[in-house]
């Protein structure tokens, strides 16, 4: 709880250091993951996605990704705290690192959760994701492919929106990249 209180600190560097320390703790031990969300940390971290600096946005998204990837309860708590519309908005952020972490977090929220997939699509993420495929940072392409795959798997409307969003040609182009071929083979399993 003391570390979580530092997320409210007025000095951005203190908050950024606290985020980094919390991320290291939750990555190291599942008990710490549970402690963060059970002690009200998720709404505080989501608040930083709303109002933080670019560094805080990046760190907060990375931390929430770690939490949401490891626990379905945390995945739901992140969504319930209002992260999805903020993350979709940050897919257009001026800082590439923020866009990368936003798409990674959206992917972890969508993974295995149809309600979150529907919410992500309703917020208009598909158009932004299609743009990331063709003009975004290279590091954003892999999580973007995974997220688009999750959104398309069982939803015909999302499939149509992905096609209309212009994702087909960038996906075909990316298949020429040997690294992406490995990803596509994993997705096809």
Image: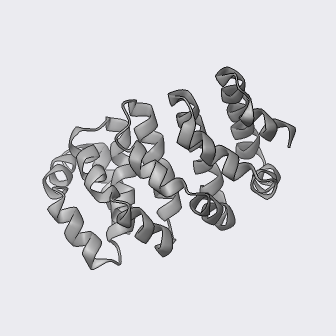
Q: Coloring scheme of the render?
A: one colour
Q: Quadrant of the C terminus?
A: bottom left
Is 171 displayed left or right of 113 in the figure?
Answer: left
As drawn, 97 above or below 108: above
Residue 141 lies in quadrant: top left
The front one of 189 and 146 is: 146
As drawn, 27 above or below 162: above
Q: Position of residue 181 (x, y in %)?
A: 28, 52
Query: What residue appears at the point 30 percent right and 58 percent down from the top-left corner?
Result: 126
Q: Quadrant of the N terminus?
A: top right
Query: What residue appears at the point 67 percent right and 51 percent down from the top-left corner?
Result: 43
Q: Position of residue 42 (x, y in %)?
A: 68, 52
The front one of 6 and 33 is: 6
The front one of 90 and 173 is: 90
The front one of 187 and 27 is: 27
Is 126 displayed left or right of 59 in the figure?
Answer: left
Is 28 displayed left or right of 81 in the figure?
Answer: right
Query: What residue appears at the point 56 percent right and 37 percent down from the top-left corner?
Result: 51
| Camera sees residue 63 | no
Query: What residue appears at the point 42 percent right and 43 percent down from the top-left corner?
Result: 90
Q: Residue furthest left?
A: 169
Total labels drawn: 0
| Camera sees residue 182 | yes
Q: Position of residue 132 (x, y in %)?
A: 28, 44
Is 128 displayed left or right of 72 in the figure?
Answer: left
């Amino acid at each position: 709880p003391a570390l979580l209180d530092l997320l409210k600190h007025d000095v951005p560097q203190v908050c950024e250091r606290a985020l980094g320390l919390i991320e290291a703790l939750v990555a190291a031990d599942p008990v710490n993951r549970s402690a963060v969300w059970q002690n009200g940390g998720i709404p505080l971290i989501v608040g930083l996605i709303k109002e933080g600096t670019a560094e805080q946005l990046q760190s907060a998204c990375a931390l929430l990704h770690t939490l949401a990837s490891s626990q379905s309860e945390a995945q739901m708590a992140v969504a319930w705290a209002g992260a999805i519309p903020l993350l979709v908005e940050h897919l257009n952020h001026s800082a590439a690192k923020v866009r990368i972490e936003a798409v990674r977090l959206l992917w972890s929220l969508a993974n295995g959760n149809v309600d979150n997939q529907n919410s992500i699509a309703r917020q208009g993420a598909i158009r932004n994701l299609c743009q990331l495929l063709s003009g975004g940072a290279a590091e954003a392409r892999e999580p973007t492919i995974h997220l688009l795959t999750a959104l398309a798997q069982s939803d015909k409307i999302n499939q149509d929106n992905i096609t209309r969003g212009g994702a087909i040609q960038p996906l075909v182009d990316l298949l020429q990249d040997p690294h992406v071929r490995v990803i596509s083979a994993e997705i096809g399993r």
